[in-house]
Image (cartoon, rainbow, N blue to C red):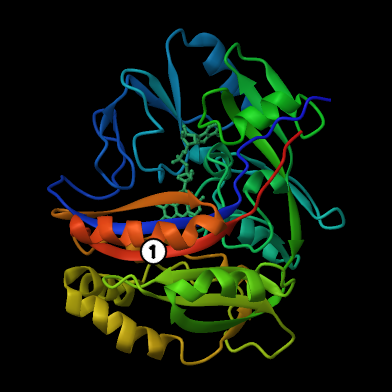
Amino acid sequence: MKKINWRQFLGFLLIALALNLYSCSNKEQPAQNNVVNDITQLNPIKVQGIVSPVSTRELIDLVKRHKGAISIGGGRFSMGGQTATENAIQIDMRRFNHIVSFSKEKKEITVQAGIRWRTLIQFIDQYDLSVKIMQTYANFTVGGSLSVNVHGRYVGQGPIILSVKSIKVVLANGDLIEASPSQNQEIFNAIIGGYGGIGIIAEATLSLTDNCKVERIDTVMKIGAYSQFFQKSIRNNKKVIFHNADIYPNGFDEVRAISYLETNKHLTIKDRLKPNDGGYAFNRMAIDIVSGSKFGKWLRKRIGNPIYYRKNIVEWRNYEATYDVKELEPRSRQTSTYVLQEYFVPIEKFDSFYPKMNRILKQHKVNVINISIRHAKKIQVQ
Ligand SMILES: Cc1cc2nc3c(=O)[nH]c(=O)nc-3n(C[C@H](O)[C@H](O)[C@H](O)COP(=O)(O)OP(=O)(O)OC[C@H]3O[C@@H](n4cnc5c(N)ncnc54)[C@H](O)[C@@H]3O)c2cc1C
């Protein structure tokens, strides 16, 4: 059998969140005059029309009937206009969002692709189960996440494709096919990470894992020590569920390594999921302060974070998996937005990469709010 080396990522994934000053109309609005935008509000795209199917049949009919180009929108959190094409129709997947089937015994769930992680987790939490691999925030749709083959903070788990049992896909001719690591393999490998270029993911069957209690442990170190720390203490530690390390702006010379280890200790946070009430005034104020000045960044590093991390909290895995993107929302979208970029760096190149990165960030006076290092495991798809 021919082996395809497909996106062999082995290394650190750096997720940088930066603030951009600009002038724009408004924040996350429903499409107006058929203009689709993403979370940055920097990429308005005029489409021919927007349709919101609620069944696979509708999805198929739509693809068969429509003569021109089709684009697909999930949660629209990808940054760069990937969800819309000028004068094409956009299929808005967000109402195609039901649970199709579930087996506690098999630890698997089949969902329509427009479902958001939050809804899915709310359901499986009742059965003490968790998502194996997803991003930090729970607002994204499953289809959008599969389409970009996301990574999370899960140590040793790799990209989301490794938790997918099978998918149902509507191809450009309207055919509905099933694809998995063993059936229609090439389509499976092309569509996950394919940004909607091959077809529409209608349904996905995902492997689940047990929900468990996790204890947060953190440590601050010079950035030069991080690579070795990761290899020695985190990479092969089976107890570590989540891990990331934040590089502090504006010096970019210190990191806080944060790990969540499986534990039997008593919970310090009893809630099973993070509240979904949108009350993020404190987070927004903190972002205002950190993004507002060098002093704000110093305050975060020297005062805010030492207080925030003073205790090793114990919480549910599902609690840690249900962050809401709203906590990042700038107080005003009239003059600012945030933009996130991701870079994949081989572990052995990290120590030569970060000094160059620091130089560029300083030279261009980038207003970096945070840089988060995660590990992206090497995968080989046959
Ligand atoms: C605050 C923030 C944090 C983030 N953190 C992470 C992270 O930790 N790890 C990570 O990997 N990424 C991260 N991202 C990036 C984000 O995970 C991806 O952009 C993800 O695709 C968002 O899902 P979505 O539902 O918004 O997809 P969308 O942005 O709506 O769509 C993404 C792509 O998928 C296509 N698509 C959507 N649905 C389907 C479908 N059903 N069938 C076929 N194609 C489809 C779209 O056409 C588009 O090309 C983050 C983004 C933000 C804003």
- Residue behind mark 1: 371
| Residue 118 seen from this side | no
Q: Nearer the viewer, residue 259 or 230?
A: 230
Q: Residue at x 50, y 32 (%)?
A: 195
Disc 1 residue: CB within 8 Å of ligand 1: no
| Residue lying furthest top | 67
Q: Position of residue 34 (x, y in %)?
A: 28, 28
Q: In the figure, is residue 275 to the left or right of 266?
A: left
Compared with 102, 315 (above or below) is: below
Q: Position of residue 198 (x, y in %)?
A: 57, 22
**Which element carries disc 1, helix, strand or loop?**
strand
Give the number of marks: 1
Q: Residue at x 31, y 89 (%)?
A: 303
Quadrant in which residue 182 is drawn: top right
Q: Residue at x 30, y 48 (%)?
A: 28
Compared with 38, 188 (above or below) is: above
Q: Position of residue 174 (x, y in %)?
A: 61, 14
Quarter containing the C terminus? top right
Q: In the figure, is residue 291 to the left or right of 238?
A: left
Q: Nearer the viewer, residue 128 or 19?
A: 19
Quadrant in which residue 372 is drawn: bottom left
User: Tag 1: Cα neighbours inside 10 Å, few (<14), some, or many (≥20)?
Assistant: many
Compared with 116, 361 (above or below) is: below
Q: Residue at x 78, y 50 (%)?
A: 108
- Amino acid type assigned to the residue bearing label 1 in the image: Ile
| Residue 243 seen from this side | yes
Q: Position of residue 300 (x, y in %)?
A: 30, 81
Quarter containing the N terminus? top right
